[in-house]
Every structure is written in C-alpha cells, then in structure tokens.
Amino acid sequence: MKRFFIESLGCAKNQVDSETIITLLSNAGFKYTAEATEAELILVNTCGFIQPAKEESISTVMDFRSRFPDKKIIMTGCLSQRYMSELEKEMTEIDGIWGTEYSDSFINYVAEKTGNSGASRTKSPRNHAPRLTFPGSAYVKIAEGCVNKCSFCAIPIIRGDLASRPSKEIVDEVKDLLEIGIHEINLVAQDSASYGMDSAAQQNIVSLVRSILEIKKDFWLRVLYLHPDKFPFALLDIALADSRFLPYFDIPFQHASTKILRAMGRKGDSSTYANLASRIRDTLPDATLRTTFLVGFPGETDEDFTTLTDFQKAIKPDWAGVFTYSREEDTPAFNMKNQVTKKTANDRKQKLEEAQTVITSAWLAAKLANATKTAAPMQVLVEERVEGSDLFLCRSRFQAPEVDGLTVVEVPAGADKAKTAPGERINVCITGVRGVDLTAVYSHE
C-alpha cells in the first residue's frame, strides 16, 4: 500500500478537488498521510489562475523535489491543465503531470507512475476521506467551469464551460457530511449564481438551496461567489424564512467604473451595484456583504480608480479582498492597450486595503456595541486551540473560512473540553475588536 501526501494550493474549489483525489486514491488501495515525510508519493494540486499563483505552484513542486529527492512527485490541477505540454518538456525533475479530470484514468496514471498497478477499485462515500478544512466545516462544489467570460479571467480556458452537478447528488453529499458531524456547509463554484443555467432539468441556485434546507438538521449553509450581474434575489427571502441559511453574500463587484466594467465584460455600474448592496441590507439588516476589487486593469485611470474608491465608501463592504490585475495569456485583456504599471496597481491596492480595514473595524465595533447593549451571546464554530493557552480560534456566522477575520475566544480552564473541541459550536460573549478580529469569552448560556 503506497502512502501519499497532497499539497493543495489555490482556492476552495481546488481544495474540494484535493479531497476528491484523497477519496479516489484511498479507494484504490493507496493510504493517505497528512505528513509529506511519511509518504512515498507527493501530489501537488496546483493553481494557475494568476502569475503569483503559477510561481507559487512551481516553487512548491521544486521545493518538494529538493527536500525529497527519492520520492515520487506528481503535479496536478489548474497549472498542469493549462500548460500540460510545456510542463512535460520543462519539468523533467518530477515523475508525472496530470490535469483536472479525476476518475479511473487518473488512478491508472498514478498507479503506473508509482508501480502500484495492482491497485484495487472500491466505492465508498466521498465523506469517508479526511477533509482538508478545519473540523466542523466543509466546502461542497456545485459546478465546474464558467460561462461569464470575464476578459481578465483564465478559468474558462482552464476549466471549460459551466457544468453543474445534479441537485440530488449535491443534497446527498450534504446529508453525508451532516451525518459525520459537519456543522457548516459552504457551497462553491466559479460562479454559484450561474448554477443550473446549463441544465435541462431547470435547476438553479435557489431551488438547490431550498432542497438542502429540506434536510431536518441544525446546520449553517453559506453560498460563496455570486456574480453581481446574476444575483438571485430569491435568496433574500430564503434567508428571512430560515436562519440556517446564512445572510452572507459574497459578491465580486471587481470595479465600479462603467468603462472598466465594460472592458472586463460586465454589465453593471456603480449605481446598479450600489443598489444591489442597498437592497440586500434593506431586506436583511444583519446581512454580511463580502466583495473583491480588481485594480490595475488595462486602461484604469486615476478617475476610474476614484470612482472605485467612492464606491467602496458608499457601500462599505463588511469584508473585501483586493487584487492587482494579472496579465494572463490567451485572455481578451492580455492584448488590451494602456497596461497599468505594477507600481501604480500596488499603490491602488494598498489604498483600498487601508480604507477597508477602517470600514471593517468600524463594522465590528458596531457589533461589539450591540452585543454589549443586548448582552446576547453569539454562536461560533471552533476551528482550533492556540497551543499552550486557553484561547480558541473560532468563526461566527458572518466570518467565512480562510478569507475573513476570526473570533478569538477565551475559554476557562474548567470548561468541558468535549463541548469546546474543534468542530463544535459554542456560545460566546463579544468583548472587543482587534484589527479585523473579534475577541470574546466563553458563555455557558
């Protein structure tokens, strides 16, 4: 039985692929280990979305080769898919390169490269494999590929057109996850708002969410990555009717200048996007709004950037990630004129990030003030304990995994360890704000 380790790079969707790889190989007679030192085979699930991610992927592979000269190393994932022929010629130091299609063909390839040709084939539920998220939380991929064709994005080149999973298959997976003690389900896709638009069965993200909420269990359900031009307003009604559906809306606005948005291949503008944010908050005053901004896109002038900063001030997103434009070959934006310098893009990124820290801190301070006024406890999901202390890193309903701030909770030494273990949900009382994190104390209520 060959032992294997997998290093998962990039986004949550890649992480789901890595969990699929673990399941496939485990069912085929390989044994997963969480330590690279214990493995005979190392797989690196790469990201090829933007230049820094490509560089990290190559660097990670070469670092493993340097550290483990005698182990088998296979590259897989988005970078491998996009540059298969080039990597096969240039990455002669490794033992194999695979793309993003994971089935029996992948198992056969790995078996061949590792001399494990006698690998068996068994079928077992996906959730039997170790999960790469923190305990109690899981990502569920609902679709692959994308049809939006944003001019800066290489995802359609790498992953192809939209391919939605059957609704029943997704619901069954969620049921399996809930049965093993998962408390938080995060639905992910390149664009969750597009889910089902390729389906003859007329599925959509709203009907999928409703089907999942028919499960009679207590859990959190969050949808990530909703394109603003396709936002499904019926989700607001669902959030009003069922508290298990978190009023957390991850909407990548990217920009607010009409000129830049059109060049990106988007239909909205600062007014329509601001109205979207207002409608969400008017309907759900406790809603959490997360977004991403992309600066340095070809042709972005100081005036365009001012439009974006004004938009940020107007909508005051609760969370926001800021990225600089990466010029990706084979995308429509690659040959656009008036490319912005890296220095200008980085300066603009810093300005948006500094402004966002102020916005987020003020939002968290308001939550602290409200919690102090009402004295009501807040439920959080425990992720991990800070070694050697009574502090636990946790997340609330308005803090998504890996991308948002945390709630740092002090738990008395005498508290029930089983009730406060990673993966459990506990009640806490907010005590302060530290940057983009909250501090809290354990509550017995």
Image: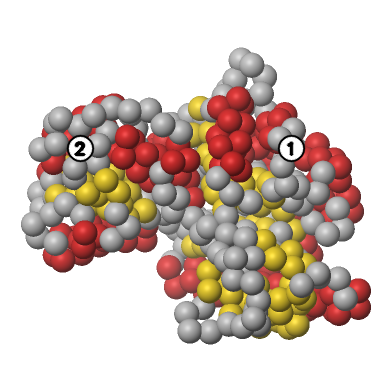
Give the alpha-carbon distance from disc 1 to disc 2, as whole Å: 40 Å
- Residue visible at 48% across and 71% down in the picture: 346
- Residue visible at 23% across and 29% down in the picture: 120
State whether residue 236 is above or below residue 203.
below
- Residue visible at 81% across and 69% down in the picture: 445
Q: Is residue 132 left or right of residue 82?
A: right
Q: Earlier in the sequence, mark 1 or mark 2?
A: 2
Q: Which residue is mark 1?
A: 216
> Badge 1: few (under 14), some or many (20 or more) residues near its Cα, within 10 Å?
few
**Type of residue at label 1?**
Lys
Question: In this rendering, does residue 354 appear at all?
Answer: no
- Residue visible at 17% across and 35% down in the picture: 111
State whether residue 365 is above or below residue 247.
below
343 or 17: which is nearer to us? 17
State whether residue 218 is above or below residue 383.
above
243 or 90: which is nearer to us? 243
Q: How is the image coloured?
A: secondary structure
Q: At numbered mark 2, what does the secondary structure look like: helix, strand or loop?
A: helix
Which quadrant holds residue 37?
bottom left
Which quadrant holds residue 254?
bottom right
State whether residue 300 is above or below residue 411.
above
Is the N terminus in the top left, top right, bottom left or bottom right quadrant? top left
Residue 50: x, y in percent?
Answer: 40, 54
Q: Which residue is mark 2?
A: 110
